[in-house]
Image (spheres, rainbow, N blue to C red):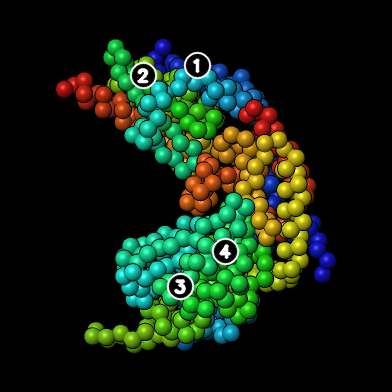
Amino acid sequence: MGFNIDKIRADFPILKRKVYGKQLVYFDNGATTHKPQQVIDSIVDYYSNFNSNVHRGVHKLSVEATTAFEDSRKYVAHFINAEDDREIVFTRGATESINLVANSFLSLINKGDEVLITSIEHHSNLVPWQQLCEKKNAKLKVVPVSDDGNLDMEFLDNMLSEKVKIFALSHISNVLGTINPIKEIIAKAHKFGIPVLIDGAQAIAHLKVDVQDLDCEFYCFSAHKAYGPMGFGVLYGKKEWLTRLQPYQYGGEMISSVSLDKTTFNEIPYKFEAGTPNVSGALATVAALKYIKNIGIDNIAKYEDDLLEYATEKLLEIDKMRIIGTSSEKTAVISFLVGDIHPYDIGTLLDQMGVAVRTGNHCAQPLIDNYCIPGTIRASFAVYNSKEEVDYFIEALKKSLAMLA
Amino acid sequence: MTIEEKANSLVEEFQMFDEWMDKYSYIIELGKEMPLIDEKYKDPQHLISGCQSRVWLYAEMKEGKIVFTADSDAVITKGIISLLLRVVSNETPKDIANADFSFIEEIGLKDHLSPTRANGLVSMMKQIKLYAKAFQLKNSN
């Protein structure tokens, strides 16, 4: 299928919206993407036609809902090439996926052990590990990032050892856009027997994810950053690891038998899914992943790369432009500053012109502190953004800068 | 002028602007001109931490009235602070404690005062009221 931007844009009803009377230009896709009609329809379809609780009813609707829910698991497994659909745990999002693993690791970490992360992590892949280390008197070690936004591989090599009990890092930095060489890093970690968790929140909509090829122990993502619904996410975990880990929430669905004296837990993945799950979320996530599949993830990556290159060139023509994150391996995220102007000022004026960007520390405060800056303005692209929008954004930016000069 | 009169005159002033650009250019100008807080008060104790722009606020009593000085690292935030301070500074603690800040809405800057903006302004308004109440208590003792 050829790449037809007009056709793609037509799938997203919100793109027709105006803000302050101006056409919306949405460049805050790193925070969340918009949803195509197909995804919206799938939610309506579920609640209109087969809403029912899963895994427990004998009646027709419950069977249909259960089948659809479990088919979703199969589809997600297929999408990221998991070996077995029992390796797919449904969560509320990447944050919950990471918290689940961090909490379940409580029993596997002892005093003096080490947990490894990197300095480019989003707070959601930092705070859970920090808390774990505090509780267990373990050491949190942080792989530094070099000025261009790449991880310092020399440091990384020196920090790997048998003392490290888990290494958690992002596939793509939400601030810098750097694509970390995770396959290589995972292989290095495995030499020391270290399990690796990948925070794929920024990756799943932008490049091909194959968990078997990566060979990671855990991979996490949120549906809403990949054209899917909010409040739904995935934890992939290798079967032997999920089996080994303790559940971290208790209740219905996750048990196999309960008496007042003792409870035995259900099999994987159910032992991690306490309570009534978000069934419509699962179905809408599948609709989103199918949407990506139909366009083709490689087509999306190529299109977004072109957009990134185009926007970067245009931005660099602006005086005192400073792009934060200049790795040669980047996805469609541009963080920047202009001179000494505070990001909030630029973001406010861009907003008045209908351009939605993110400003601030992007929930990665240590990384921002590392660069000694007050934050950045971040433009992050999705498959429905166009060169015309980039042109409009550049014009709006120039206008803002003139006002602030 | 009373607080209310000052607020009304501000609202009138802003009615002149038809274009958002003129309004914001004016706010930016105000931000640049604002009487700044003494550098020695730009410390953690006087910092109002918003998520994005930082705001410092200092208050002192002069002849029965509270005089506020402030600063922010974002110029638009500074401009809006200067609007607020123009209305509430140099007033008695009692008047400030009872002041109505809804004029900010009337001049079309409501969005800036929503808690989601995380620019420190909402906390700053709370802090202004807190200062007023603290000075009120001190005076009554």
Q: Are marks 4 and 1 on the same chain?
A: no
Q: Which residue is mark 4?
A: A153
Q: Secondary structure at mark 1?
A: helix
Q: Which amino acid lies under the numbered mark 2 shown in the image of this protein?
A: Val
Q: Secondary structure at mark 4?
A: helix
Q: Secondary structure at mark 2?
A: strand
Query: Marks 4/2: CA distance?
Result: 54 Å
In the rendering, at what x and y percent does residue A149 appear?
Answer: 60, 54
**Which residue is found at the position 64% from the left and 27% from the top?**
A405
Task: Give the quadrant of residue A180.
Answer: bottom right
**Which residue is found at the position 75% from the left and 53% from the top?**
A309
* Up/down of A202 relative to A20, above or below: below
Which residue is at the far left?
B141
Q: Are marks 4 and 1 in contact (CB under 8 Å)?
A: no
Q: Which residue is mark 1?
A: B9
Q: Which residue is mark 2?
A: B67
* Up/down of B15 relative to A333, above or below: above
Dot 2, how many residues are within 10 Å of its Cα: few (below 14), some (14-19), or many (20+)? some
**Which residue is found at the position 52% from the left and 62% from the top?**
A155
Q: Which residue is mark 3?
A: A161
Query: Marks 1/3: CA distance?
Result: 68 Å
Dot 4, how many residues are within 10 Å of its Cα: few (below 14), some (14-19), or many (20+)? some
Q: Which amino acid lies under the numbered mark 4 shown in the image of this protein?
A: Met
Q: Are marks 1 and 2 in contact (CB under 8 Å)?
A: no
In the rendering, at what x and y percent does residue B74 appear?
Answer: 53, 33
- Chain of the residue that carries numbered disc 1 in the rendered image: B
Q: Are marks 3 and 4 in contact (CB under 8 Å)?
A: no
**Residue A95, labelled with which disc?**
none
Query: Marks 3/4: CA distance?
Result: 14 Å
